[in-house]
Image (tube, rainbow, N blue to C red):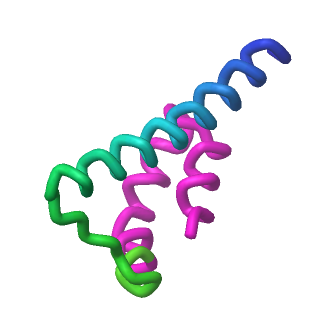
Amino acid sequence: MEAAAECRDYNRSLAAEKSSEFLEKMEEAGVEVTTLTPEQKDAFKEKMLPVWDAYSDIIGKDLIDEVVNTK
């Protein structure tokens, strides 16, 4: 379980790093990227609450909480 948790954390960290790199490359290539305002993010999160509740047992509450608390 400990190794699985370490692997999960490493994978999430690596995914975030790669996501930033890919976003930067897309912007350099001329792709228009829309960044949501905090208000838009909050509205999206509010609309997602029923979905997260329905799938929390499958996805895992820790991952859902991480997404919900991301600013």
Residue at the image position 59 percent from the left and 37 percent from the top: 60
Residue at the image position 33 percent from the left and 72 percent from the top: 35
6 vs 30, nearest the viewer: 30
For the image, the number of numbered tags is 0
Examine the structure image and report whether residue 5 is included in the region drawn in magenta: no
Give the magenta-colored segment's residue range: 42-71
Which SS type dominates the magenta stretch?
Answer: helix
Image position, residue 38 (x, y; %): 46, 82
Left or right of residue 17: residue 13:
right
Among the 4 quarters of the image, the one containing residue 42: bottom left
Left or right of residue 16: residue 50:
left
Residue at the image position 15 percent from the left and 57 percent from the top: 31
Image position, residue 34 (x, y; %): 25, 70
Q: Which quarter of the rendered picture does the N terminus lie within?
A: top right
Examine the structure image and report whether residue 44 is included in the region drawn in magenta: yes
Is 22 drawn above or below residue 36 in the view shown? above
Left or right of residue 42: residue 28:
left
Image position, residue 46 (x, y; %): 42, 74
Residue at the image position 56 percent from the left and 50 percent from the top: 64
Is 26 drawn above or below residue 47 in the view shown? above
Is 3 drawn above or below residue 26 in the view shown? above
55 vs 10, nearest the viewer: 10
Image position, residue 37 (x, y; %): 39, 82
31 vs 61, nearest the viewer: 31
